[in-house]
Structures are given as C-alpha cells and as structure tokens.
Image: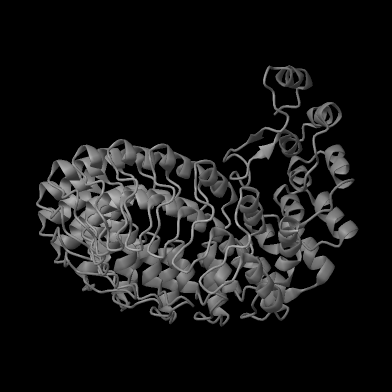
Amino acid sequence: MNNDKEKFITFTEREGFNKDQTLKSRLYQYPFYGYSLLELCCYHGAVDCFKLLRTKFNSEITDTCLELSFLGGNPEIMSECLKYKKPNCKCMRNAIISHNIDFVTFLMNEYNMKIDLEYCGKYKNLESFLVYFDQTNDINKCFVYSPILNISSLLEYFLSHGANINRKDNFRRTALHYAVEYKSKETAELLISHGANINEKDNNGKTALHYAVEYKSKETAELLISHGANINEKDEDGRTSLYNAAKYNGKETAELLISHGANINEKNKYGKTALHIAAENNIKETAELLISHGANINEKDNNGKTALHYAVEYKSKETAELLISHGANINEKDNNGKTALHYAVEYKSKETAELLISHGANINEKDEDGCTPLHIAAIENSKETAEVLISHGANINEKNKYGKTALHIAAENNIKETAELLISHGANINEKDEDGRTSLYNAAKYNGKETAELLISHGANINEKDNNGKTALHYAAWYHRKEIAEVLISHGANINEKNKYGKTALHIAAENNIKETAELLISHGANINEKDEDGRTSLYNAAKYNGKETAEVLISHGANINEKDNNGKTALHYAAWYHRKEIAEVLISHGANINEKDNNGKTALHIAKSYKIKKQPNFLFHMVPFVNDFTG
C-alpha cells in the first residue's frame, strides 16, 4: 500500500467493494486473524487512504489500528488512533521493533509504559535497551536480557557493577537461558566462566541444555555438557534433552547426548520415550539412531501405546516400516485394546494398513469394545480401508461387545457406500445386536434414509422386532423420523404392530407429540383407538405428555374421547392427573364426560382437587374454575 489515494478511490468504487473486508497474509503480524483496510493503512503509514476510509466509510479505529501505527510510523495516523484507543504492550513492542526511540519514550513518559527488554534484544534495539537502563538503573534485570543482544562488553559491564549471575526474570529464566536460546555461544561461555548455574531451571523446568537442544545448537550443547550439564534432567513434563532432540528433529544433538550417556528409554510424565516422539513426528533418522543405541521398540506410554501406534496414528509410514523391520510387535494393544491396525483404519491411512497387514497384523483383532478394524472403518466412513480389510479376509459379520456388526455401524452413521460394500461381500442384513435390533433399526433411529432404502432393497425384514417388541417403525416414530417412516410404510411396514407393552407407532408418536408422523400413520390406516396393555389409546398418551396438537389430530380422526383404560380412567382423568389444562380444554370442548368415574369412583374433578390439596395448587387455580364453567 503506497498511499496512492487516486488508485485507492478507484479500488473502493469497484462493484462489490466491501469496506469491512479483511486480508490474511503471512507478510503481517498475526496473519491468522486478518486485517481490515484501515488497519493496513496504519501498518503502511498510508495517511491519505486512512483519511478516506474514515471520512467516506466511517471505518472503525480498532486496538490493532493503534498497535500497527507504531510500525507504520505516521504521526498523524497515530494521533488520530490515540483519540479513540489507549496504548497497550503491543504498541510498545512495535515501537521497539520500528527502532523509533521517539515512540518508545513517548509511551514511557505519557503512558508510563515499560520497555520490553526481550524485544529490545530480539530486534537489536540497543538504544531502547539503554534508555530503560538509564531510567531504571535496574542492573540485574538488564543483565538477564543482555545476552540476547550478544554484546560481550555490555554483559561484562553489568557483571562488573554487581549483577547477580544467576538472577531470574518473571519466567525464572537466567541470562544463560537467554544466551543459549538466542544461540550466543560466546556469551554462554562468558557466563559460565563467571559461575552461572548450568542446571538452573525456568518456570517450565527447562535447563539451558533443554534450550540448546530445542534450538538445535550443537556447539552450545557441547559447551554446557563439558561444564557439567545434567543430560538426563527433566522439565516439568518429565522431558529430557534427548526427548527434545527427537521432537525438534535434532539428530546431531541427539548423537551428542547419547554419546555422553543420555538415557534413551527415559520417559516423560506421560510415559513417552524419545522413540515415541520420533515416531509421532515421522523423524526416521532420529528413530534409527535411537534404535541403534538400544531404544525399546515396544515400550508403552501411560496410554499403552508403542512407538508403532504413534507412527501409524500420525501417518508416519516410513517410520512405521523402520519399527517393523526392527521387531515392533504389530499386534500390540494399547489401554483401549487397539492395535496399530485399528489406528491405521481410524485415521484412514490405507497404505499403512496394507503395510501392517503384509507383516501379519490380525485383521479381526478386537479392541476393548469388541470392535475390529472393520467396525472402525464403518465408524470413520473409511471405505478404502474397509475394502483392504475385506480383501484380506476380514470377518464381515463379526460383532462387537454390544452385538453390532460393521453393517449396524454403517447404518447408524448413514454411510451408504460402506453399507453397500459390506452387503456386496455377504453382510447379514437381518443380524441382530444384543438388544435384538437389526441394521434397519439403526437407520431408522439415526435418520439414515438412503441406507434404510438400501437395506430394504436387499431384503431387510421391515417388521422384525427387537427385545422390546419394537419394529423399525416404532423407532422412526420415537425419533421424529417422518421420512424414514414413509419409506418403511411404503415397503409394507405393519402400522398397527405392537411392542411388548402393546404400543403401536401411533402411541409413540402421540407420546412425543409428533403431529406430522401421527398424521402420516393415520393416513395409512393406523388404528386410532388401539389400546396398549394398560388399555390406553394414543389419546391417553397425548393427554399424559401434553401433546395438544397431536390430541387435536386424533380427535379430528375419530378418537374415542371417553374411552376407558384398565383402571377405568379416560383421557380427561390423565389430563387432570398430569395438570394438562390445555389438553383438558380440548377434550371438554369435544365432548369429554366430566362426570365419568374411574374404577375408584373418581372423576377428573376429584383428581384435580386432590392435586390442589397435595401437590399442584397452581394447576388447580386454573383447572377448577375451567371445569366448573362446564359443570355449571
């Protein structure tokens, strides 16, 4: 952005121009969030374009505008932003980055903001660093951050004036930590020669050696080790320097550490060794190095995972091949009973799955839930890996501990393609799980219309019952699956089929106040006055569960309002019992007998009054006057 106002005006006059558009680019700080046009003007110091956006489009000044103005360096933009926003620490950091001492001192003097010494070092702003020292005379703090500037004379000056060699900052880092982090070997040597504690830890439990390895500074690592650095020291997560070498692909530093006695099989607090990490990050060379020096290939972490589990999980095929070639147990299970093949399928890594199978992976091995890799393929919609498994002899009808086959799972997730594949290779469509449910039940329950149609076209028994006597149509009614219900009915589902409690799908629809499904069932011949084992019709369910709309549908299609159940109660009794005032109004308005008595001689009004005394005074306050209107 070159502050070319005329070109910018032309840009804003284009069709579809959006004043609130944002730009994401790695050319700018924090590219993830994106920057508005006004913020970019601040960054580039484009004052004329900035003014245009403010006057013509009333673009909002944000905190980011002010922050970026200290990088853009235009005083006019900065002044305008300061009218609306208060400076924060990012403003000071940007002032330091821009090497504008006037901005730095302005923020110090006008807003009492502190200079960030680490940023001074990081961006080699010695002038701002010295301004801080001049203003505060804080020798120890300046000393801690001075190694970042890599100026030996400055460091020696602070030491000669009494700086504490092991002084720590707010992160508990010493000058040696910073010297190592910023790869200043000469400064590190100077600090060590003055007695710096090599094994001092920061807030995260890291020593200088941890940092040397993390930033791949082999020479500095050698220096630290030669002066007594503890190679096997752990940080707060239990990570040694060798662990870091594996994590950050530092083969050379790993070799150095091993040559000085690093414990290759040392674990962090999660039970991971350096080999686990090398496998996780697909760092084959480091993994080879660790194995050649005795790393335990089958060592497990706290989750029971071996390096092979991680190599497969993170799709590190090359490292997986290496581990297998050195004797990794392919069928080793983690704490959840999963083998590497389970992971290959879960993460849809077809090539790795083929690799494992070619080396003897048990295709039908089960995890703690009884799921085979084929079950996992169905769960994850991984058709390609399912094909690989089937081609190598996977048992298609194998059940997990809940009695579900892969086809049950595919139907549950409405994965039609995988279901087709399984069926084409002999999956038993009418196989039942431990609850007596077939795959069609799952399709009905989870709204898998396409899969339901597929199953039916291949012979699924539509009227099959589960252990509770429910058909797929019962499930479609229970879970509000009208489209599934239509499919089932169109293929011959028995609308009046009862479950073991004597309830039809219409009972279920009424119980859940699913008006549309109730209408569908009625339109296809559902018996409105069919009774369950307690002698209750669908209207009872509507009254009990407050299904006003469904009650109206049932009544409009001939529901017997005064029908009695086995206890002699009518729907009005239930409306009174469950304090459903609106339902009671509907029933009475359609001729419900208010004086009808149950087997105990009680009318709906008796029940309503008993609620006034015992449970629901608020209900009776509304209910009794209403009933009295109809009883005179």
Q: In which quarter of the image is residue 576?
A: bottom right
Pick whichever, 166 or 567, lies toward us. 567
Pinpoint residue 215: horizontal percent, then vertical percent: 46, 61
Q: In which quarter of the image is the N terminus?
A: top right
Up-down: is 492 above or below 326?
above
Q: Do we see residue 105 in this rendering? A: yes
Q: Do we see residue 377 in this rendering? A: no
Q: In which quarter of the image is residue 46?
A: top right
Q: Quadrant of residue 125?
A: bottom right
> Is the image coloured rainbow, by chain, by secondary structure, or in one colour?
one colour
Q: Determine the residue positioned at 42% across, 62% down.
A: 535
Up-down: is 425 above or below 190?
above
Q: In which quarter of the image is the C terminus?
A: bottom right
Q: Determine the residue positioned at 73% across, 29% down.
A: 19
Pick whichever, 82 or 557, lies toward us. 557
Pinpoint residue 3: horizontal percent, then vertical percent: 76, 27
Q: In this view, does 77 lie to the left or right of 67?
A: right
Q: Total of numbered circles in the picture?
A: 0
Q: In this view, does 11 lie to the left or right of 364?
A: right
Q: In this view, does 196 lie to the left or right of 488?
A: right
Q: Determine the residue positioned at 57% across, 67% down.
A: 597
Pick whichever, 405 or 162, lies toward us. 405
Q: In this view, does 548 lie to the left or right of 263?
A: right
Pick whichever, 166 or 289, lies toward us. 289
Pinpoint residue 269: horizontal percent, then vertical percent: 41, 78
